Amino acid sequence: MGSVTDEQPDPVRPGAQYAQNTTQVVIDPRALTGIARIDEITKALAETLARAVDTVEYLPTLTPRLYGTLVHLAFANMVRFQRLPGIGFWDVETTFSLEPGAHYGSKDSIRTDVVLRNEVGDIIAIYDVKTGNQGLRPGRVNELRANAQVSPSVPVIELHVLHGVRLTREQIGPSLGTRQAWLLPQINVSGV
Amino acid sequence: MSMELYVLSDRRLKSIADWQAAISAEGFPVSLTTGVPLEELNGIFPVQLGGQLTDFECVHWRGPEVMAEMADVDFGHPWVHVLALRWGADLYAGPAAYMAAAAYAKAAGGVLFDCEEGKIITPKQAARIGRELEQAIPEAQAFLRRLMEKLKHQP
């Protein structure tokens, strides 16, 4: 997969469209399970997230939180339309609860970004998208597995959009500011 | 559900009614709509933002455990309690979460950790962010409409 480039992008032009910029995907080898079905979907979802990031147009007024919301919206809808094997419509933004039969607003309930199922419908991987500076906490990983009622062997895979301050000055070039770093998003895929 | 906001405090509000009163005192258009007692919140929490039904996950954590897991963050104080709010692809959840969390933090004498920016923010800052997100809903709706049109027409 690609890696962070040290090429300097064109200067920011307020109001310009940067959707043609290609977000790079970097997959940590530890995110790969050796199970072809899971690893192929991991790569496909990372590429979908990269397209979702590219879809969110650069706007001078875009705050980190609105950016995150738009990326999540784009990703969820693109995955639903993509019809990847093992990911049905309801496997995106799925609510899980420890209370049998309970769903909305119930105790001990969580919502996953994407789950991947095998041929008989069992969950074989959980994917979580991160757009902020903080990655998945270990405690959250445990919650995801517990509430989805899967074993500790089921991988929880983080798809993390890195931008702005998450790219070091060396990576983005010493003369570039935070706004320009937004033009160099990167998807880091890591397993937990 | 992976956009997160943590309220850090040394005391908890006593009830959903107290939390709602704090929200109302700030003039936020957020209504908490659960029958679950506040101390038992541990899951998806239905709320309304200006009459629009939405939700976010809401979980109580112990402060020392969270701060130990996030040792690279300077929390500035050994907070006792963490109320974690979490949401995903929902236009209304973000503003509701920031507003509700801002009101909780102010009433409980706490601060917030904004996971999107990775820094501590004040209740006042969280309130402003909530308002900004609320005002951006039409922009986000327009984005979503354009996206759905593209997806419907792609091969």
Image (cartoon, coloured by chain):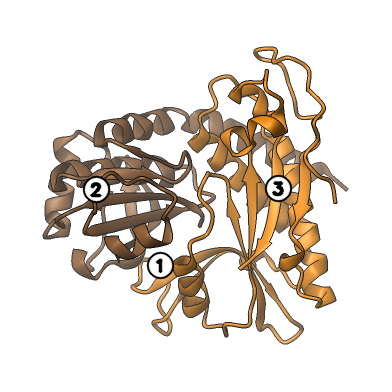
Chain colours: A orange, B brown
Q: Which residue is mark 1?
A: A104
Q: Mark 1 falls within which chain?
A: A
Disc number at residue B77?
A: 2
Considering only vertical position in the picture, is B14 above or below B103? below
Identified by mark 1, the residue type is Tyr
Using the numbered discs, state the Cα–Cα distance from disc 1 to disc 3 in whole angstroms.
Answer: 31 Å
Residue A138 horizontal/vertical position (percent): 49, 67
Disc number at residue A187?
A: 3
Can residue A124 be seen in this snapshot? Answer: yes
Kindly identify the residue that appears in the image at 80 percent across and 69 percent down: A39
Between residue A11 and residue B40, name the one nearer to us: A11
Kindly identify the residue that appears in the image at 26 percent across and 41 percent down: B102
Residue B92 horizontal/vertical position (percent): 43, 43
Using the numbered discs, state the Cα–Cα distance from disc 3 to disc 2 in whole angstroms.
Answer: 33 Å
- Binning the other alpha carbons within 10 Å of mark 2 as few (below 14), some (14 to 19) or many (20 upward) gives few
Q: Mark 2 falls within which chain?
A: B
Considering only vertical position in the picture, is B132 above or below A146? above
Identified by mark 2, the residue type is His
**Labels 1 and 2 touching (C-beta < 8 A):** no
Residue at mark 1 shares a chain with residue at mark 2: no
Using the numbered discs, state the Cα–Cα distance from disc 1 to disc 2 in whole angstroms.
Answer: 35 Å
Q: Is residue B57 left or right of residue A51?
A: left
Residue A79 horizontal/vertical position (percent): 71, 56
Quarter of the figure with residue A33: bottom right
Q: Mark 3 falls within which chain?
A: A
Residue B3 horizontal/vertical position (percent): 48, 49
Q: Please tell me whether mark 1 or mark 3 is closer to you in this view.
A: 3
Residue at mark 1 shares a chain with residue at mark 3: yes
